[in-house]
Image: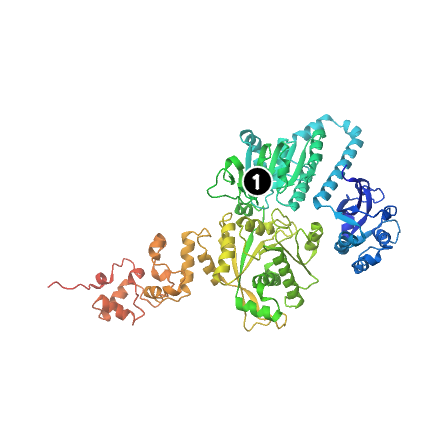
Amino acid sequence: MFILNKKYIYVKTNKDWDYEDKYKYGVTQDLYKRLNDFKESSSYKFNYAYIFEIIKLEPIYFTKFNYKSIDKIFSVLLRNNIGKLKNIHDFIELRKHLVNNDTNAGEEFIYKSGINLFIKILLNDFKSIGVIIKQLDINDVININSIIHYYNNQINKTNIHDIALDKNENDNNKEKENKIINDGIKPFDYQISILNNIEDFYLKNNIGKLIHACGLGKTITSLFIVKKLGFKLNLIGVSSLQLKEQFGNDIKKIINNSIIIYFDNNLTYIKNYIKTSKTDIIFIISTYHSCYKLKSIKFDFKIGDEAHHLVGSASDKETAKFIEFHNIISKKTLFMTATEKFVNNPNDNIYTMDNINQFGVLIDEKSIKWAIDNKKITDYDLCLIKNNKNDLLIIIEKLEIDKNHINLFMSAYMVLKMFEKVELKTTHTLIYTNTIESANIIKKYIDIIISKNIINGITAKNLYNKSLNSKNCSNINNEIELFIKSQYAIIICVYLFGEGFNLPKLNSTCIAEPMSSEIRITQYLLRANRLDIDNPNKKATYMIPYIDDEDDFNMKIKNVITDIGLSDESIKQKIKLLNFKEIHNKKSIIDNEYTNNFDLIEDNGELIKIKFKLRSRLFYKLLDEYNDMIKLNKEFNYKSKSDYYNKKDINSNFMEDPKSYFDVLWKSWYEFLSINTDNILKTKEDWIKRCKELKIISIEDYYKKQKEHEELPELPEDIYINFSNIQNELGLFKRRR
């Protein structure tokens, strides 16, 4: 077995030790035995968190390498080599993180706070004395844990085999018949509807696609399908390492008698296992980056999770490996996503989700609006946070922060200001950037802002703030636990907590930089919409800070509105606009020299302008557009129709012929321009009487006197019922000669 007969340094954990914030470490040649050491009893299952293979060790050390304690190993290796070390300080610092062991029972623990230093010493500092150590990839570690637990389960099954034989045969039959519902998780009504028709669907079709909004449980639905149809050998393709493990955890909940193998170049092992296994159901889980290596295996069922990643060209280097997933043979296939992706004018070499030969027939579709209306995910507010560049530069200068990243500073500061407004109930946020560098800059800005004590109620003690990525986050579960337990929490990331990430405690998301991928926008914002049993009234908040110029507005706001709106036509009712501006005569809660008198103020007037500007993207009904245009015109304080046309150059929403455009909705220019008619004569009879009193003798004379007398309307035909025209109503006809 590949995990035996080598020298390993291991770090292992379980839930008991997680609560104590520590790891157990040691050395072994038998990873299987070490994970099952009977002396280390616990009610929870053990797992390796890290494994390191010792590649090179000088002969002098071999006879002394039976120490279980890493600190003892240090002393052996360093006995005559202390002068060769480049960084003795690391070893001194590490002692602060080792757990004192009063029982002297051979247990060596290290606090989680010291694990990064521990790894640095193993991988870097030991090189200076000729000890070469390689850290196993996280997928290898997951796979080793999976295999060991599988063998443990097999042993347990063997031990209870005799007892199982005595069970009533009818119980077994009943269990086989109940293929849909698991003891712990039951399908929702919409999932049951799919399952009731799925057998007939796959009798008629080989490929199908499931288009469900984020949060509806596509993974769970796919596993119920596997369970009902009894597929034995299943391939699951995912887009990231995190989803790989997450999918595996869901399998354990739904089909607990299955075997899960995480693929990572262990093809020979997988083929041998498939040949010899008598297990009912096997799952091979692979990232799309590696799936092309599995083309030699024929599967019963193939699941393409986040299937929009499988769109593109087979000749494109960036997508070629992903596209190979289509070429893996399976009897039946299921593609799943919340966000379909299409390619315009595709050819035979291009994969697009509207091609039924490539992605199959639609099984079921559920939009964001459907999910919200049916209370499967939370509702949301889309908060557009308007900023003035000069105001931000003033604050940046006072804080002595680099001016080159004003947009990143804006996102850092606005998220904290949103936290400060308790009524908004935003406390746990993911901020998304395009690069790790940008994420790190935002993290630094947040630390600076907090250190200046300018955000009411938020300090370094009650705020979790980290920039996380696959390179600096070796224990995601530990970080998530810290995130959940903090009163306020921010994670800044690029991809790590994007697609498929499920955390009910999360109540808000922020887009810090313009995203070119429409799909990424929708996928990321909706991370905050998971239902939370501890917060039944939860409402997600999407934060989109922007600077008040056309470029920033176009890049950020328009893309977000369009992409979310495609799946939720009611988005226009959920938009709020918060204006970050100086409030005069406002006493600051915290007296400081940096930002007092600046606050986030809800601005409904600006919101109307934004909505009208985006009307083509907001699925506006004509009535909505008409009403909003009236509100916009009111700000110009028009006095007349001619005044409207005279000011057309300063009105960005000017319409040349609004009467024809709004057609049946049109009532009058007075309504459209919000002109006050209180002083205008109320009836046609009174108007005629007043015109005669003023001795109006022509059309020209009327308009001259109309400007002098406010009681006369510019457009009497818009005011009076059954009004023909001025000439007819006043009898202004020239006599024939």
Q: In this view, does 131 lie to the left or right of 653?
A: right
Q: Mark 1 points at which residue?
A: 323
Q: Element under label 1?
A: helix
Q: In the image, residue 339 lies at what x, y percent?
A: 54, 45
Residue located farthest toward the top when viewing the structure as drawn: 169
Q: In the image, residue 325 lies at what x, y percent?
A: 59, 38
Where is 617 relative to 681, above or below?
A: above
Residue at image point 20% right, 68% down: 697
Residue located farthest toward the right when viewing the structure as drawn: 104
Amino acid, disc 1: Ile
Residue at image point 83% right, 42% down: 37
Decide if residue 180 is in sight here: no
Where is 76 relative to 409, above or below?
A: above
Residue located farthest toward the left when viewing the structure as drawn: 737
Residue at image point 68% right, 33% down: 281
Q: In the image, residue 285 lies at what x, y percent?
A: 66, 39
Mark 1 Cα shell of 10 Å, populated few (<14), some (14-19), many (≥20): many
